[in-house]
Amino acid sequence: VVAVAEAVVAAALSAVGLVSYRAVLRSYKKSRLETGAYAKNVVLIGQPSAVAWIADHFRQSVPANRFQLAGWLSLNSTAESASHTAMATDERQRDPNLPCLGVVEDLPQLLINSPLHEVIAVQSSADRDWLKRVIEDCDYFRVCLRIVPEALLVGTLRDLKLIFHSEPLRLPEVVLVP
């Protein structure tokens, strides 16, 4: 009888210990998630007006503890990049913390030297020669690429929230995951 009682007590203590351990671990992970410790760093590629629109969309619709904007890459050469950087800063007076990290040709170097988890490329109808290279770079470095057609960014942010309510970024996108 004593052996059975000891076995029951040992089983109960083991169960309590396991439940307590899992509860502590779950609350620790939840607090880290809420503070953004596991947030994915995202870089944007596109024209300054499209980047400003996406940055505004991130600020209003995307949880900051899941995705953080690291910066953006211009589509133009370095000679034209300074003027577009200034233009993008003027358009985005509300978000001056989004730095221009360079031009699209700098993406491989950024993926090597920076902790970037995803790339969002906004494809315009005018210039698309750069997109093939971005797809190849993201595939080579095994980074998730989201391609958003600029023509679909015509609605309001409210419309996107209604249409893409279950998606984490709430964007009309094509996702290429390596």
Image: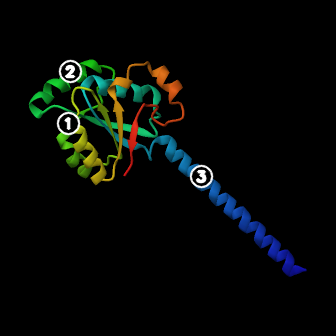
Q: CA distance from mark 3 to mark 1?
A: 46 Å
Q: Is residue 97 above or below residue 20?
A: above
Contact between labelled residues 2 and 1, with CB atoms less than 8 Å apart: no
User: What amino acid is labelled 3 in the image?
Assistant: Arg
Q: Residue at x 67, y 58 (%)?
A: 20
Q: Nearer the viewer, mark 3 or mark 2?
A: 2
Depth order, front residue of 14/58: 58
Indicate which disc residue 26 carries: 3
Mark 1 vs mark 2: which is more N-terminal? 2
Label 2: element kind: helix
| Residue identified by numbered label 1 | 129
Q: Is residue 176 above or below residue 7?
A: above
Label 1: element kind: helix
x and y, in percent, of residue 83 in the image: 14, 24
Q: Nearer the viewer, mark 3 or mark 1?
A: 1
| Residue identified by numbered label 2 | 87
